[in-house]
Image (cartoon, rainbow, N blue to C red):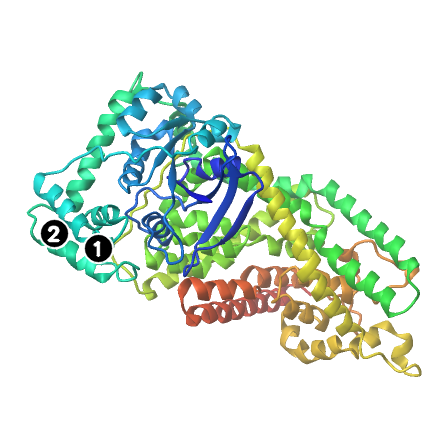
Amino acid sequence: MDKVALVGNPNSGKTTLFNALTGENQKVGNYPGVTVERKTGNFRTPHGHKVEITDLPGCYSLSPNSPDEEVTRDALLGDIQGDDRPDIIICVADASNLERHLYLTLQCIDLGIPTVLALNKIDLAENAGIRLDVTQLAEELGIPVIACHASRGKGIVEVKQALRHPFPPVAKRSWSVSKDIEKAIHTLSSELSESHDHGAHALHLLADAAYLKATNLTIPAEWQHLAEKQISQLEANPEDAISKARFTRVKEICSVSARRQQAMELTASDKIDEYLLHPVFGWMIFTAIMFGMFWTIFSFAEIPMGWIEEGVGAFKGWVTPLIPEGDLRDLVGDGIIEGVGGVIIFLPQILLLFLFIGLLESTGYMARAAFIMDRFMSKVGLSGKAFIPLLSSYACAIPGIMATRTMESAKQRLLTILIAPWMSCTARLPVYFLLVGMLLADKPSWTQAALLAGIYLFGTLSAFLASWLLAPRVKGEEEPVHFLMELPSYQKPDLKYIAQQMGSRGYAFVRKAGTVILGLSILLWAMQTYPKPAEDSPAADNPALALEQSIMGSIGKTIEPVVEPLGYDWRTGTALVAAFAAREVFVSNLAISYSVDEEDDELESRLSDRLNNATWPDGRKVYTPLTVLSLLVFFVYALQCLPTTVVVRRETGSWKWALAQLGGMTAIAYIAALLVFQIGSLFVS
C-alpha cells in the first residue's frame, strides 16, 4: 500500500482535509520511539487504488522548533526507525495566506518526493480580493495544484485523482544559490550516495544548523562530519543563503499567481480584529464569551439532564423488581445503576463545553484569545503559546500536557505542564455541578453559572500564580521567548468537525462511565456491603451501622481524623480517596454510600437532596455551605488523576517532576480546604 504524508502549516485546514479524505477509516497511535500522536487513515482513489495517509503534525517549516515539528521533519526524511519515507506528499496551504505557506511547500519539493499542493480555503482568498491563477501556480512549482475547500467537501475528489498511478514526477528545485554553495550541495550529495534519499539529507544538513548539530538523529554521525567539512570551506552561511533563496522564490511565485486587487484594503477579518483585539473591548468581549459559555452550560443542559435522571430512575425501577431480593439486587440497583447513573447525568454539560471549544477553534477566535492573553501571561513567565495547551486542559489535562510539544521553550513547556492540571477539566464537572447545585439550589441559573465561572477563574489565576512563583526556580533560557502566532482568517464554523469532536469526546466519557466508573462502582459497593453483619447483631437492622462496620467504613473511620478538620465525614473522606483513581468516582461513591440510608417509601430523587439531609451523629448537618466551599477548593487544587501523573513523567522524562507535582498539588489542596473551613467557622456558627 502506498503511503501518503499530509503536511501543512497550523490553521491550514490540514486535519479537516484528512477527515474528508478518510471518513471513519482512521486510527491513532504513536510514532516509534516518541510520544507524539500518529494519526493515520486509508481511502481509495477514484481508480480503486488503496492508499494509507498520515496526518503529520502541523509546522511552519522543516527547520523545527518543537518536538512535534521534529517528527514531521524526521518522517519526511525517513529518519524515524521502522517508518519508511512517504511515497507522495500532499502539502496543504491556506490560499488566503499563500506567501506564508509556500515556504513549506518548497521544502517538501526539495525532498525529492512527488508532491501535490492542496490549495485550501479558496473562498477566503476570493473574499479577501486575492486573484489566484492555479494553472500558473502549478507551472511555477512544477507540481499538481488542486483548489479545494475541505470543510465543504469541495475538491476532495480532485485531490484523490491526483494520487493516481503513476504518481506525478518529482519536481526540480526552482531556486538557486551561489556557485560555491551549489557545489557544496552537489559534493555532499555524492558523498552520501549510499542513501537513496541522499539529496534530501545533503540539502537539509546544509540548510538547517540545528539538524547538523543534533545528537538524537538516526542518520550516521559521519554524514554530519562531512557536512561540517563542506560548510567550513564556504565563505557564506549556507543556512541563511538557502533560506533567503527560498523566500525570494516564494515572492516571485506569488507575484505572478496570487495578485491582490487592492493591496491596502483591510479584509473583513482585519476589521473584526479592530474590536476583538482591542486592549479594552477585546477583554470585555473575551470575558462575555467565557461567561456566556458557562451560563449556557447550566441553563440549556437542565432539560436533557432531567431526561437522563428520569431515565436512570425508571431503569432502576424496572430492573430491580426483576431480580430476587439479596446482594445481586443491591449490587445492580445501588451499585451499578446508582454509581454509573450519578456520573452519566452530566453528559449534556460536557457535550456543551466541547461544542463551545469547537466553535472557538473552528471560527478562528481561539488564536485571538491566545493573543489577548499573551501580555498577561508574559508577566507570569509564560507566553501566549501556552494558552492553547492550557485551554485544552479544560477538557482534559492529558491532551493539554501533550499539546505543549508545540512550544519551543523547554522552560515554558515545563511550567505549562506543571500548572495544566489546575485548569478545571471535564472530570471535575460532575463534582462542580453537584456542589454548585447544592450551594445555590434555590438561585437562578445565571448565579450558578457565575459561581462556576468563578471556580474556573480561581483555578486559572492560581495556576498563573504558581507559574510566577516557579518561573525563577525552573532552569532554562534567560532570554525572553517572543510570541509569534498566525491569526487565521475568520470563517464559518465547521459543524461536521465539531459534531465529530463532540461525538468522540462524548463516547469517551460514556465509555469511561461504562468501564472505569462501572468497575470502581462495583468495587465500592462491595466495600460498603461486606463483611455482612451477623443476623443477631444490632447492625443487621441498621443500614447506617452496617455501613460503618464494612470495609469502606473501616477505611473511612481510619482517615476521618485527617479529613474532619476540613469539615468532611468519613464517607466524604473515602469518596475523596477513591477519586484519585478518577475524579468522577467521587459522585458515584457518594451515590452508593448515601443510598443505604434510605427507606423505599422515602427515596430521594436527587443525590443532592440526600447529601443535604446527611448529619453527624450529634445531629449537625454534614454538608453545610462551608463544607461545600471547602470541597470545591479541594477539587480545584488536587491532582486526583493518576493517568495525568504518568503522562507528566513521560513528557518530562522524570519521576521527580511528576511526583513533586502530585504531592505538591495534594498538599496545597488540603491546606487551602483546611483554611477555608477553619477560618470560615470563626465567622459562621
The amino acid at mark 2 is: Ile
Q: Tag 1, which secondary structure?
A: helix
Nearest to the observer: residue 109 or residue 547: 109
Image check: 146 left or right of 63? right
Q: Quadrant of residue 545?
A: bottom right
- Residue neighbourhood size for the residue with mark 1, other residues' Cα within 10 Å, grouped as few (<14), some (14–19), many (≥20): some
The amino acid at mark 1 is: Leu
How far across and down, in percent of the image, does residue 45 sit? 50, 33
Position of 65 relative to 659 (above/below): above
Distance between the alpha carbons at the discs numbered 2 and 1: 10 Å
Nearest to the observer: residue 1 or residue 491: 1
Measuring 66% from the left and 64% from the top, which residue is drawn there? 627
In this figure, which residue is indicated by the disc labeled 1?
212
Position of 154 relative to 12 (above/below): above
Q: Earlier in the sequence, mark 2 or mark 1?
A: 1
Q: Quadrant of residue 266?
A: top left
Measuring 90% from the left and 63% from the top, which residue is drawn there? 599
Image check: 181 left or right of 78? left
Residue 680 showing in the rendered view: yes
Image check: 4 left or right of 493? left
**Which residue is the extreme one toward the top?**
261
Nearest to the observer: residue 301 or residue 671: 301
Q: Tag 2, which secondary structure?
A: helix
Dot 2 and dot 1 residues touching (CB under 8 Å): yes
Residue 288 showing in the rendered view: no
Image check: 618 left or right of 246? right
In this figure, which residue is indicated by the disc labeled 2?
231
